[in-house]
Image (tube, grey):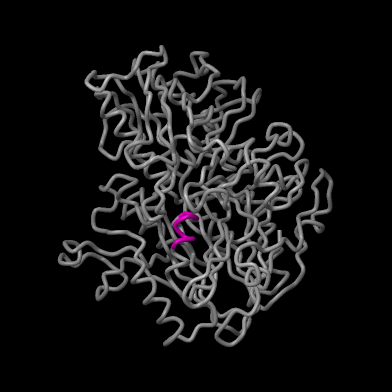
Amino acid sequence: MTIRRRDFLRAAGAAAVTAGLPRLARGTDTASIYDLERFGNARILHITDTHAQLNPVYFREPSVNIGIGEMAGRPPHLVGRAFLERFGIRPDSADAYAFTCFEFEKSAARFGRLGGFAHLKTLIDRLRNDVGELHSLLLDGGDLWQGTGLANTMQGRDMVEVANLLGIEAMTGHWEFTYGEQALRDNLERFKGEFLAQNVFLTEEAAFNDARAFDKATGRVFKPSTIRELGGYRVAIIGQAFPYVPIAHPRRFTPDWTFGIREEELQKLVDGLRGKDKVDAVILLSHNGMDVDLKLASRVTGIDVILGGHTHDAVPQPVAVKNASGTTLVSNAGSNGKFLAVLDLQLAKGKVSDIRYHLLPVYSELLKPDPAMAELIGKVRAPHVTDWSEKIATPDRLLYRRGNFSGPMDELICAALRHELDAEIALSPGFRWGVTALAGQPFTLEDVLAETAISYPETYVQEMPGAQIRDVLEDICDNLFNADPYHQQGGDMVRTGGLNYTCTPTAAIGSRISALTLDNGKPIEADRRYKVAGWASVNAQQGAPVWDVVAKYLRSGRMAENKSSGVTLRGVEDNPGIAGQG
C-alpha cells in the first residue's frame, strides 16, 4: 500500500490509501505488484523481526491483539475484518492473507508461503536498482539472528553471512544480545554494516573497570547513529535497541550494560544531528514495539519517521503523531521476512518535503530466488539438514502461536511439558516468534526448533503456591495491557496448560486475573502448592532443552487435545482487536 505525507499532515493519522496492492493470483506478473512508481530522491528499505527464517514460511497473523485505553481500536490493535475494513482490503485478496488471519487456511493453499532470504534478495535488488545505488539504503530493525535451530547453533553467524550478502547497511538489536557480549562482538566484527544502539550504556561498575565502549565519555556501548548521503542529501539513522533486554532475558547475558528508552539522550542526539550536523532527515530505526514508538513520537521532536519493530505488527500505513515541533510518522513492518517496507523520501534542504510508504508482502511464488543467496542458504544449512529433517509428527490441525493469549502451537508445548515432566500445570512464554504449520503436512525436528530455539531453553519443574501462580499471571498481564506503553515490554501472555482463568484486560493492575481453576474444574487454592513445569526462565535451570521434551512427546504419537485456550475474556466484548468483533 502507498501513502503520502501530505495526506498524513492533512488528516493527522487518518490518511487515505492512495493505491492498494493488486489482487494476487498464481502466475501474476510481478511487475504489477512490485514495480513501484519512481518518487523522490531517496529510498530506504526496511526489514525487521525476520527471526532467521532463511526459507519461505507460513505465518498466521493474530486473531487477538487487544488495544487498551487510547490504543483501543487503533492500529496496530485491529484484527480480522476490522483490519480489512480500516485499510480497505478486500477479504478474498492476497493482501488479506498477508496482513490478517482472515480465512488463513483457505488462503494459505491459494497463495502459498511468504518471505525467504533468496526471494527478499531478488526484491531488494530490484527496488534498489530502480532508484540507483546512491539513492538507497537497506536497514534491519533487529531480531535478525535468532529464531531457528541453525541460528541458535551458530549463535547468529549464519545470519551475519546472509545479512552481508543481502546488503544490510545498518541494524539494531534485541535477541542478538542473548548470545552474550563475546558472541555479539564476534559477529559484529564480521558484519559489513553498522550496529546502532543509542540506548545501551555501561553500568557504573563496568565504566569504573574500563569496560569496552564506543564512547567512554558518555558510556555508550555502541555507535548511536550514522549519517548517510542519499541523492545528495544527508540522512541520519539512529538505532534504538530493545529497551528491556535485562528484564525480559537472563541478566547474565549483558551484565555490564544498561538499557532503557532513554528519551532525554535521544532528544539530545536528535538536536545535535539537526543542529551541528545539519542533516536533512532523521530516521529512528527502532525495536521498541509500536505502542512504545507511538508514545515516543509524541514526546521526542525532530524525528521524521520511526521504522519500528519488535511487536511484529504488519501495519500498511504509518501512523502520524503530532508533537511540539511537527509530525512524526510511525511504522511497523511485520515479521518472519513476510514484508519489505519501502520508504521513499522527497528531501530538500533541512527537511523532508514529501513521503510515500509501501509495505510489500514478499510472495515467494512470485519472486525468483536469487541464485547466490540460495547457494549460501544451502551451504550454511547443509551440515544440519539430515539431522533436522526427521519427520516426528503430522499435525491434525493448524498450529500457530501469535495471539495475545494462546495458540495451538503453545498448547502443544504445554501438553508436552505436562506429560513428559509429570506436572499439573505448564507455563510457556508468550513469544511472538515461531512460524505456522499446516494440518496434514510433515512436522520435523527443524520445525520444533523454529518454535523453541533460544540460548536458555532448559526446562524446569517446581512447586508453586496458587497465590504465586496468580501473581505471575497478573505481572505478565500488566506488561501486556498496561495503559502506559512505556511499561509494556512486548510479547504476549504466558501460555498455560492444565490451568484455566478469566482475564479482564481493562481492569486495574492486580485485578485482571480471576477464577483460576485446574482442567478438572477445581479452583486453584492460594495456599496449596502445585507442580509446575516450564522453560525459558531468566534464572539458570538444569533441565533438558525444551525442544528435546517436545520432540520426545511427539515421537510417541501424541498430539495435544484440541480444546479452547482456557482463557475467558471479560470487558473487551466490543474490542476490534478480537476477530469477529468491531
Q: Please give the name of the residue rendered at 38% of the width and 56% of the height, measured from the top-left corner.
A: 486
Looking at the rendered structure, the number of numbered marks drawn on it comes to 0
Residue 266 place in picture, x, y as percent: 38, 71
Residue 245 location in percent, x, y?
34, 52
The magenta stretch spans residue 150? no
Quarter where residue 390 is shown: top right
Q: Which residues are magenta?
A: 289-295
Q: Residue at x 44, y 66 (%)?
A: 239
Magenta highlight on residue 293: yes
Q: Residue at x 25, y 47 (%)?
A: 252
Magenta span: chief secondary structure: helix
Please indicate whether residue 348 sits to the left or right of residue 457 in the image: right
Quadrant for the N terminus in the image = bottom right
x, y percent for residue 52: 52, 47
Q: Quadrant of the C terminus?
A: top right
Q: Is residue 407 above or below residue 10?
A: above
Report which quarter residue 444 is drawn in: top right
- Does 217 appear above or below 94? below
Q: Nearer the viewer, residue 145 or 537?
A: 537
Query: In which image quadrant can residue 453 be found?
Result: top left
Tell me if 114 is positioned left or right of 311 in this view. right
Of residues 284 and 227, which is closer to you in this image?
284
Relative to residue 506, is residue 538 drawn left or right?
A: left
Q: Position of residue 542 (x, y in %)?
A: 26, 30
Residue 330 higher or lower than 353, as above or below: above
Q: In the displayed structure, would residue 394 be above or below residue 331?
A: above
Q: Nearer the viewer, residue 408 or 469?
A: 469
